[in-house]
Image (cartoon, rainbow, N blue to C red):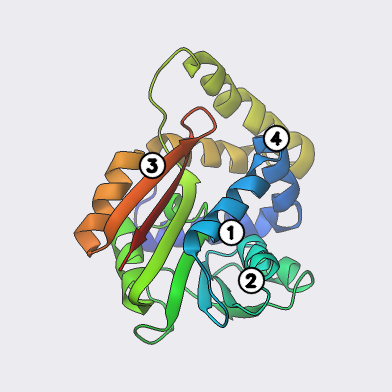
Amino acid sequence: MIPSNEKKADDVRDLFGRLASRYDVMNRLMTGGQDVRWRKAVIRRAQLTSGAYLLDLGAGTGDLGREALRQVPDSLPVAADFTLEMMRVGQGRAALRWTAADALQLPFPDEAFESTVSGFLMRNVSDVQQALSEQFRVLKPGGRIVILDTTRPKKNLFWPFIWLHLHLAIPFLGWLIARDRAAYRYLTESTENFLRAEELGARLAMVGFQKIEFRRLMFGTIAIHWAEK
């Protein structure tokens, strides 16, 4: 049991610090390479234009920021994370603007970005509502938020296979590749305890976002949400 928001933040920072050098490889393996396609879809949903500022929040090694530059070469992505080791890995891969940032207290002025995007961030924050409020604050009017994250799947014919993947395959890969089975057990638990896609959509509406939509992926275990300020 995590006793406080501050303790959770410290635990998450420590976890991803340990995984930084192998994080991208693990993502490819856990998703069968589908996460690359999902990130392309996230940037398309952001509807970037020439010269637009994009905030890649919880950037990790900067996958979304790099995809933004591939799709719109003269866009201006800013990669923000609070895990130093992840940023160190990412800084050697693309000429992104990097900054240390806490998703609950962003160091940016109001209405600074045309888009904010995140990949597998929201289930790890200690206060989802505050993280959404901060992104709403830094978006310009008409700006778009796009969220890629896990979601609790509905029980269906695929549920036994989903359970096996979450509880056996992912922890085993965590041990085999990263030698950190406990860390990937946390990822399984955070997936199962995170909001359903409909619930995250409702949280977006509570903050003030409009035109909220989402799409489920990977047998209902992943969702992309998008909305406008």
Which residue does the image show at 57% across and 77% down from the upper left?
Answer: 78
- Given the image, on which type of amino acid does mark 2 rest? Val
- Given the image, on which type of amino acid does mark 3 rest? Phe
Q: Who is closer to the viewer here, 162 or 124?
A: 162
Give the image quarter of residue 66: bottom right
Which residue does the image show at 67% across and 71% down from the upper left?
Answer: 69
Q: Which residue is mark 4?
A: 32
Q: Determine the CA span between mark 2 and mark 3.
A: 32 Å
Q: Which residue is mark 1?
A: 14
Q: Are marks 2 and 3 in contact (CB under 8 Å)?
A: no
**Quadrant assignment for the N terminus:** top left
Mark toward the start of the polypeptide (4 vs 3): 4
Mark toward the start of the polypeptide (3 vs 1): 1
Q: Which mark is residue 194?
A: 3
Is residue 171 among the parts visible in the rendering?
yes
Q: Which residue is mark 2?
A: 72
Q: Determine the CA span between mark 4 and mark 1.
A: 26 Å
Q: Are marks 2 and 4 in contact (CB under 8 Å)?
A: no
- Given the image, on which type of amino acid does mark 4 rest? Gly
Callout 4: SS: loop
- Given the image, on which type of amino acid does mark 1 rest? Asp
Q: Who is closer to the viewer here, 84 or 156?
A: 156
Vertical relation: 189 (above or below) 7: above
Q: Are marks 4 and 3 in contact (CB under 8 Å)?
A: no
| Tally of numbered discs | 4
Mark toward the start of the polypeptide (2 vs 4): 4
Closer to the eye: label 2 or 1: 2
Callout 1: SS: helix
